[in-house]
Amino acid sequence: MFQRHKGRRRAGDDGVPIEEEEGALTTMGRFYDKVLHFSILTRYLLYIIPLALCFLIVILIGHYATPKATIGGVKIKWFFVWLEIVWCSLWVSKLFAKALPTIFQALVGVVSGGVKKYSLVLKALELPLSLVGWAVASLCSFLPLMTKNPDVKSDKILPWEDRFNKVLISCLVSTLVLFAEKLLIQIVSVDYHRRQFAHRIKTNKNHVKFLSQLYEVSRNLFPEYTEFAEEDYLIHQGLAGGLNIPGLNQSGSATPMRQFLGNINMVQDKVASAFGNIAQEVTGNKNVFNPNSAYAVVIDALHKKTSSEALAKRIWMSFVPEGHSALAKQDLIDVMGMELQQQAEECFSSLDRDDNGDVSLDEMILHVMHMRNERFDVAKSMQDVDNAISALDNVLAFIVFVIVILVFVVAQQSSVGTTIAGAGTVLISLSFVFAVTAQEILGSCIFLFVKHPYDVGDRVDVDDKRFVVEHISLLYTILKRVDNHKTTQIPNNVLNTKMIENITRSKLMKEQIVVSVHFDTTFEDIQKLKHELSLFVQENSRDFMPELDVEVAGIAKLDQLDLRIEIKHRGNWANETLTLQRRNKFFCALVVILRKIPIYAPGAGDPAVGEQGKPMYTVAVSDELAREEMKKAAAAKTAKRWDHEDDDDDDDDEPNHGSKDMSSSGSTAVGLDLNLSGHRARSPFNDPRPDTAHDNTTLGRRSTDSRRGDIEEYRATIFTNLLGSK
C-alpha cells in the first residue's frame, strides 16, 4: 500500500540514455570470439586465411592482369608465391611442432614407458622448432622460385637475390642457435627436476595416498560430526575459528557473518558431492568432482596447520584402542581387516618413520606436519629453481643475441677473415670487462645445477653456523640463522668454496658428548654408567637408537678422565624443537645417573680444604730438624737420578774437610770460607789418563768429566763450610 511512496527512478537514471559499455563485444565480435576459441584448427585458419587471400589476389592479378609486372627482375606472381609459401609454412611448422610431442609419445611409448619427460621437452620447444621449420622452408623455396621458374630464361642469380639468400641463411643459423640454447635450458630443467624433486614428490604423494586411505577407514568407523565433531569442523572448515563448536577453545566471539559463511561452505560441499556422485558413476573415479572424497579432504587439510593437526588426531584416535597410548601395526590390521593386510602394513610403514614398532600421538602429528611442510618446501624450491633457470635463460639469450648479430654481419661481408678478426678483438676487449661476472655466473651455475647441496627449507651448517634456506636464486642464496633469525645473503660462488653440511638430507644422526670426570673413576664405574645409559635409551626408544657406547677419550694431565659418550638419534636434527627436547631429556638423565653411581667431577668428591672432613692445621718444628729434613729430601731426590753414583770415598772425606776448614777459619773470619787451599787441585798437564786414544780434550785443557768431578767436590766443600758457619 505504500508503493506510491517509493522512488521510481532506477539507479544511474539521470535522463540520459544508458550507453553500451565501452569495450563490449558486438554480435560479430562475439561470433569471432566463439570461432576463435572453438578449436586450434579454426583458430589457425582465422590467422592464415586473411593474409593468404591477400597474397592470392596479388598472384592472380600478376598472372592475368599484369603478366609483365616485375619486382627486382622477377615477375610479381612468383615473388608473391614465395611470400605465400613463407606465410603458410610458418603455421604448418607450428602445427607440426604442436603435434610432435603427441606423435613422439605414441610411437616411442611402445618401446619405452619413460618418454613422458622427453615429450614435455618437445612441447616446451614448440616455438624454436616452428622457427627452424619456417627458416628452412623459406630458404629452400627462395632461389628455386626466383631463378628456376618457367619465366626465367637464365640461371643467373641477381645481386639482390644473392644478398637476400645470405639473409635467409643467417636466419636459419640464428634459429638453430636459438633452438640449441632452448634445448640446453630444457635439458637442464628436466634433468634437475628429475634428480632433485622426482623422488621427493613421489614419496609425498605416497604418504598422502596412505593418509587418505586411513582417513577413509576412520570416516567409515566414525561418521563425520559425531564422535570427532571438533576435529571434523577443523578439517572441513577454513573458517572454523568463527563457528560455535562445542568444546572448542576459541579466542574472541564468532560473528554472525563468519558463521553464515561457514554454513555456506558446508552447503557448497554437499552440492558438489551430489554432482560428484554422478561423475563417479560415469568415470569410475572416486576423486572426480568430489570435494568430500578422502583424498580431496586430506589435500585441503594439509594447507593449514590447525586442520593438519586435527586430521592427525582424528586418524590416530580412530585406530588406537581405549586405554592404549600408541598405535601398533596390529591395530591397523584389526580395523582394516585381513584382506587389506598388505595395505595396512604399507600405511603403518609410512607412519612409523623411526621403526620403533609403534606410533604415538605426537609422532602422528609430527608426521602429518612434516608432510605439510614438505609439500610447501618442494613447491617453493621448484618455484625458486624455475626462476633461477629463467635467469640463466635470459643470460644465454643475450649471448645468443650477440651471436646472431655476428652471424648477420659476417654473412654480409665479403672478407670473412677480416670481420672475424675485428669481432674477436672486440670480444677479447669485452672479456676483461665481464670476466668477473662471467666467472661468477659460471660458478653459480655449477653450484646450483650440478652440485645443488640444498633446497628451500633445508637445515644446513656453513662455517659452523646453523642456517635455514629461505630462497635460492641464480647468483645468491638467502639463509636465515637459527640462533638469532638474522637473514643472510651469500653469493653462490662464495658458497661453492665452502663446506656445507645438509642436516635435512642426513639420515639418523650420531652425537658425541665429552664428560670430564674424576681421575679415580674405576672401570667398573664406567661400565655401570654405560649400563644405566643403555637402559635409558631402551626406555626412550622413540627418541634414541639402542646403539650406545662409552669410551675413555683421554687422561689430560693425569688429573682427570675424559669420557666420550656416543648416542644415536632417531632422525636428523632438522627439527630444532624436537632435537632440543631429546638433548634436554638425555642430559638430565645423564646427570641423574652420574649422581646415582656416583661419578665425580675432576677434583670433586673429596672434602674441600677447610671442611670438617679435611681441616687445616699447622705444626711447628725446630730449625735444626727442618734443615736436616731438607737435606735428606735433597739427597733422596739426587739418589733417584739414573746417573747417580754412590762414592764412599767422597762421603768419608767430606767431614774431614769440613772440620779442617772450620779450624782454619779461626775467629778472624765470620761467614763463608771457601778454603781453596784445602781443595784437591790437579794440574791439567800432569793428569795421567789410562786411555789416551779416546781423549777429546785439547792441549792444556782437562776433559769435561774430570772438571765435573772437581766441581762436585768444590760444591761439597762450600756446603760444609756453610753448615759450620751456622
Image (spheres, rainbow, N blue to C red):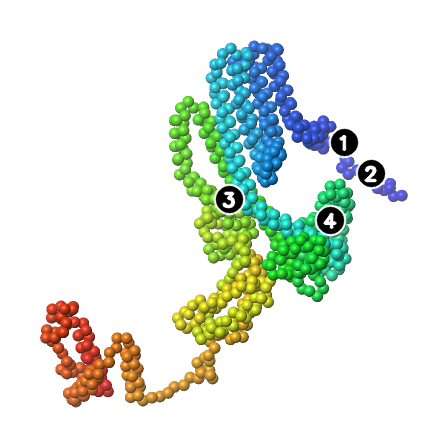
Query: Which quadrant is home to the N terminus?
Result: top right
In the image, residue 275 lies at what x, y percent? 77, 43
At x 29%, y 86%, the residue is 628
2 or 3: tag closer to the N-terminus: 2
- Residue 478 versus residue 688 in the image, above or below: above
Q: Amino acid at mark 2?
A: Arg
Depth check, mark 4 against mark 2: the one in front is: 4
1 or 3: tag closer to the N-terminus: 1
Which residue lies under the disc numbered 1? Answer: 17
Depth check, mark 1 against mark 4: the one in front is: 4
Q: Amino acid at mark 1?
A: Pro
- What SS does tag 1 mark? loop
Which residue lies under the disc numbered 4? Answer: 292
**Residue 75: which quarter of the image?**
top right
Depth check, mark 1 against mark 3: the one in front is: 3
- What SS does tag 2 mark? loop
Q: CA distance from mark 4 to mark 3?
A: 41 Å
- What SS does tag 3 mark? helix
Which residue lies under the disc numbered 2? Answer: 8
Mark 4 neighbour class, 10 Å CA radius: few under 14, some 14 to 19, many 20 or more: some
In the image, residue 348 lies at what x, y percent? 65, 56
Query: Does residue 41 appear left or right of residue 530 in this picture?
Result: right
**Residue 126: which quarter of the image?**
top right
